[in-house]
Every structure is written in structure tokens, then in C-alpha cells.
Amino acid sequence: MEEKYMVNDILSDTKESLKTYESVITEAGNTTLRQTLQEIRNSAETFQYDLYRIAELKGYYSPAMPATTNEINNVKSEFQE
């Protein structure tokens, strides 16, 4: 398997793991468990971002074009109503 596909698979898997951590953390009643899960999530977020930066530098991933000021203002207005 090509490196590009492996990196994209890992990025995708990590993204899904982060969603799971979010769900579990919000339901954790035990403070120690909650803090531990938050630390694991934070590490996973850092890993995901570092891998994303490598993928971007190698040309494996192209982020979406930045939103225009008009698009940003439209979204803001929708949430301010």
C-alpha cells in the first residue's frame, strides 16, 4: 500500500477516535477517568494535527479553500438570529 493511502487511513481513523473520545468524555462521571480520557484525546489531537501537517507538506492532502469574508459573515448572521 502506498504511503499516501496509509497516512490518509490513519488520519481518518484518528478523526473517528476523536469523535468517540468526545462522546465518552461527556458521559464520564468519574473525574479521574474523565481527566485521563481528556489527556488521551489531547494527545490524539496533537498526533492527528502533526500527521496532517506532514501529509499536507508531502502533497497527500489538500485542505479546502479558505472561506471568504462574505461566507463567514453569512454563517455568523445565521447563528446570531
Image (cartoon, rainbow, N blue to C red):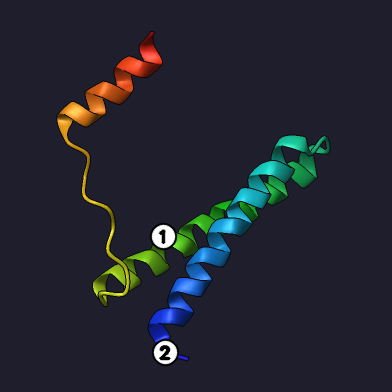
Mark 2 surroundings: few (<14), some (14-19) or many (≥20) residues within 10 A: few
Q: Position of residue 70 (x, y in %)?
A: 17, 27
The correct choice, above or below, for 68 with respect to 61 in the image is above
**At 66% from the left edge and 50% from the top edge, which residue is drawn?**
21
Q: Residue furthest top?
A: 81
Residue 49 is tagged as: 1
Q: How far apart, in angstroms, are the residues tagged by discs 1 and 2?
A: 20 Å
Evaluate whether residue 43 shows in this view.
no
Q: Residue furthest right?
A: 30
Mark 1 or 2, nearer chain start: 2
Q: Amino acid at mark 2?
A: Glu
Residue 49 occupies which quadrant of the picture?
bottom left
Above-or-below relation of 70 to 42: above
Q: State left or right for residue 58 relative to residue 31.
A: left
Residue at screen point 32% across, 25% down = 75
Q: Is residue 66 above or below residue 11?
A: above
At a point 36% along the width and 17% down the height, the residue shown is: 78
Q: Amino acid at mark 1?
A: Tyr
Q: Quadrant of the C terminus?
A: top left
- Mark 1 crowd level (few <14, some 14–19, many ≥20, 10 Å Cα): some
Pinpoint residue 37: horizontal percent, then vertical percent: 70, 50
SS at badge 2: loop
Q: Secondary structure at mark 1?
A: helix
32 or 23, nearer to the observer: 23
* Quadrant of the image occupied by residue 53: bottom left
Q: Would residue 57 appear left or right of 23 to someone viewing this image?
A: left
- Whether residue 27 appears in this view of the structure is yes
Q: Is residue 20 left or right of residue 52?
A: right
- Write down the residue under mark 2: 2
- The percent coordinates of residue 10 (x first, y second) are 52, 72
The residue at 25%/29% (across/down) is 72
Q: Nearer the viewer, mark 1 or mark 2?
A: 2
